[in-house]
């Protein structure tokens, strides 16, 4: 027992002293693949972004020996693991790791907003056609909500929830006079929100903050997926039992989902960035290369240089 | 008001009423005991109700989970998360036990020697300071151990693996998990062992010294042997904590999806870390199966404790006051 302890202590001391690693990055080493777990929305967005959607909920398609960590877990692991690769939401990127270019474009907020960075998806909204509301109050509250999305108050909430807000035009206080409906008591009015479940958290935070600002209307959330965003506001289910006033979609609207003028728009971007260790020599990866790494076609960094 | 108070007072003074109060207090205590004891039943029913579902419910066509396959499986999940019933925890059970006993193997000798030092060798002042430090160590929440593990221990393991010529996965490994767990169960083992060592009859010790044994001989051959039953209790509680710890483990284990893993630098998974994975986001069969894992965990802890208790009885009790 004494011997075992001694050997262990020795190894510990050695390893601590070796922490100042000055050995160079070795491209012949194996790639360590990090991923979020199957219930993560970031994982779904990432897999979709690299054209590997099947792997969003199926660990079996990924390379052998991958690691599952949460957002911060991936971030802190890549700091240590010189040969690791992982992905995080752009909001959490820091300078302790290297955020890779995607298809040659730097992962910056600016490139996301000007639509050149590819590994992202838009968060869109759609409301009912203006002449399709049951009454004027419901229509006016919905329009006020859309206006709120573009204020800095709305943008702050979106940023807090981890997405990238679009440029904002002033605060809610600046524009609330244009929405007289919000100074009335609306506590008997229910506004129904639905669509993408990836946006549910953001939508909940938005309505929680906005309802008190607009006469305490009652927000009702039922998020069942992006396709229901259009279907239940202006599409086939718009007059059904589960109709919605506001629908969300965490992807671009399809050609078959064009609503009447002025009822659709974008509230945010969700951007994901692929990260590696700072010493890693790789700077840029394409969707195809990332897919091959996660599928196990590329096993060492050599194959990417 | 005063009148009522006086009546109560008089009633209290009579012998008959005193008996009445006795009965009332008894009933009250019985009630509180019943409440606390019934929680185990409520929790067990809740976990069983949720955890049995995957084995009997069809989940709209996904199908039942096969119990044998579940208990013997070497891959956590084959197929898609919300659309597959091919879950398996066999390898995780092995991993969990392997890790728990490795941790015990590491922290038992350290803990017992620390306890011996505090109880018998250290000067009184130093002993009380050390005891406080050990108590503080026990009071640190597990998430803090987890953060310490992922911030410090993972780095150490990663560099250590390099020395051994192994490319570890960011340090996430069996060894990292064992180190974090050993650290966590160390105070439990030390505190309980110390109590056991203290309660060894002073006469045996003096007898040993009187027969010419040195202090060291007495400490190891007489004191520790006499206290072994108490030390074993410490070990049992230590293993219990190691088996049930989730937060810290899930931060350093790497959450391997298949196994079992025995190599020190390979990633691993325990029952608890598997339960914790994505718990807040998941639904349907993928959610319910976590309760099934919970049942497995309870059974594993129960069996382990019963076995260790059996062994403890075999070892026997020597002259403990």
Image: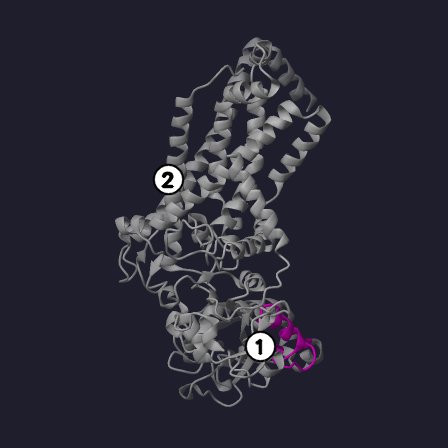
Q: Is residue B127 left or right of residue A303?
A: right
Q: Is residue A249 visible?
A: no
Q: Residue, x 64% and y 59% (percent of image)?
A: A20
Say whether mark 1 and mark 2 are on the same chain: no
What secondary structure is found at the residue carrying circle 1?
Answer: helix
For the record, the magenta segment spans A148-172
Query: Which sits in the foreground, A26 or A132?
Result: A26
* Label 2 Cα neighbours within 10 Å, binned few <14 / some 14-19 / many ≥20: few
Query: Which sits in the foreground, B34 or B16?
Result: B34
Could you say where residue B263 lies in the image, as x and y percent from the top left? 42, 50
What secondary structure is found at the residue carrying circle 2?
Answer: helix
- Chain letter of the residue beneath label 1 in the structure image: A
Could you say where residue A41 lies in the image, as x and y percent from the top left? 47, 68
Height in image: B112 above or below A272? above
Could you say where residue B55 lies in the image, as x and y percent from the top left? 29, 51
Colour approach in the figure: one colour
Q: Is residue A154 left or right of residue A194?
A: right
Q: Quadrant of residue A176?
A: bottom right
Q: CA distance from mark 2 to mark 1?
A: 55 Å
- Chain letter of the residue beneath label 2 in the structure image: B
Q: Where does label 2 land, which residue?
A: B299
Q: Where does label 1 land, which residue?
A: A141
The reply to whether the C-beta atoms of the residues labelled 2 and 1 are less than 8 Å apart is no
Q: Is residue A39 left or right of residue B133?
A: left
């Amino acid at each position: 027992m004494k011997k075992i302890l001694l050997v262990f202590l020795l190894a510990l001391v050695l390893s601590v002293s070796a922490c100042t690693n000055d050995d160079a990055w070795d491209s012949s080493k194996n790639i360590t693949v990090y991923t979020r777990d199957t219930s993560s929305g970031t994982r779904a967005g990432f897999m979709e972004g690299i054209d590997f959607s099947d792997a969003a909920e199926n660990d079996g398609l990924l390379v052998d020996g991958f690691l599952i960590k949460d957002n911060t877990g991936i971030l802190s692991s890549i700091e240590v693991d010189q040969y690791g690769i992982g992905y995080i939401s752009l909001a959490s990127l820091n300078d302790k790791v290297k955020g890779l270019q995607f298809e040659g474009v730097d992962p910056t907020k600016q490139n996301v907003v000007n639509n050149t960075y590819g590994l992202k998806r838009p968060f869109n909204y759609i409301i009912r056609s203006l002449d399709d509301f049951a009454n004027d109050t419901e229509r006016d509250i919905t329009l006020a909500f859309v206006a709120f999305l573009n204020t800095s108050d709305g943008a702050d909430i979106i940023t807090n929830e981890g997405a990238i807000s679009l440029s904002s035009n002033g605060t809610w206080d600046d524009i609330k006079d244009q929405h007289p409906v919000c100074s009335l008591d609306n506590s008997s009015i229910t506004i129904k929100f639905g669509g993408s479940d990836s946006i549910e958290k953001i939508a909940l935070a938005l309505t929680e903050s906005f309802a008190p600002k607009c006469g305490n209307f009652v927000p009702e959330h039922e998020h069942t997926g992006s396709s229901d965003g259009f279907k239940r506001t202006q599409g086939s289910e718009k007059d059904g039992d589960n109709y919605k006033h506001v629908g969300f979609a965490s992807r671009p609207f399809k050609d078959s989902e064009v609503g009447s003028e002025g009822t659709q728009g974008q509230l945010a971007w969700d951007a994901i960035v692929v990260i590696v260790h700072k010493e890693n020599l790789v700077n840029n990866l394409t969707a195809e290369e990332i897919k091959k790494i996660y599928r196990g076609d590329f096993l060492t960094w050599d194959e990417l240089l | 008001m005063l009148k009522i108070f006086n009546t109560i007072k008089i009633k209290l003074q009579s012998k008959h009423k005193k008996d009445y109060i006795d009965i009332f207090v008894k009933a009250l205590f019985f009630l509180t005991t019943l409440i606390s004891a019934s929680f185990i039943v409520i929790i067990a029913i809740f976990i069983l109700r949720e955890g049995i579902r995957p084995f009997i419910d069809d989940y709209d066509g996904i199908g039942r989970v096969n119990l044998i396959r579940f208990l013997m499986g070497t891959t956590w999940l084959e197929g898609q998360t919300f659309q597959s019933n091919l879950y398996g925890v066999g390898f995780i059970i092995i991993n969990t036990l392997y890790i728990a006993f490795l941790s015990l193997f590491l922290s038992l000798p350290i803990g017992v020697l620390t306890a011996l030092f505090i109880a018998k060798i250290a000067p009184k002042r130093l002993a009380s300071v050390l005891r406080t430090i050990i108590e503080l160590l026990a009071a640190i929440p597990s998430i803090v151990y987890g953060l310490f593990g992922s911030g410090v221990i993972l780095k150490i393991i990663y560099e250590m693996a390099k020395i051994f010529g192994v490319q570890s996965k960011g340090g996430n490994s069996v060894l990292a998990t064992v180190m974090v767990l050993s650290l966590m169960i160390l105070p439990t083992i030390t505190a309980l062992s110390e109590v056991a060592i203290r309660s060894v009859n002073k006469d045996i010790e003096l007898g040993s010294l009187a027969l010419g044994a040195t202090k060291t001989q007495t400490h190891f051959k007489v004191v520790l042997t006499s206290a072994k039953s108490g030390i074993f209790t410490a070990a049992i509680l230590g293993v219990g904590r190691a088996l049930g710890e989730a937060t810290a483990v899930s931060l350093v284990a790497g959450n391997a999806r298949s196994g079992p893993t025995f190599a020190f630098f390979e990633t691993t998974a325990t029952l608890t870390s598997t339960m914790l994975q994505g718990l807040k986001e998941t639904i349907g069969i993928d959610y319910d199966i976590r309760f099934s894992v919970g049942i497995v965990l309870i059974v594993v802890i129960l069996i382990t404790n019963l076995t260790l208790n059996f062994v403890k009885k075999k070892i026997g009790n020597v002259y403990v006051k």
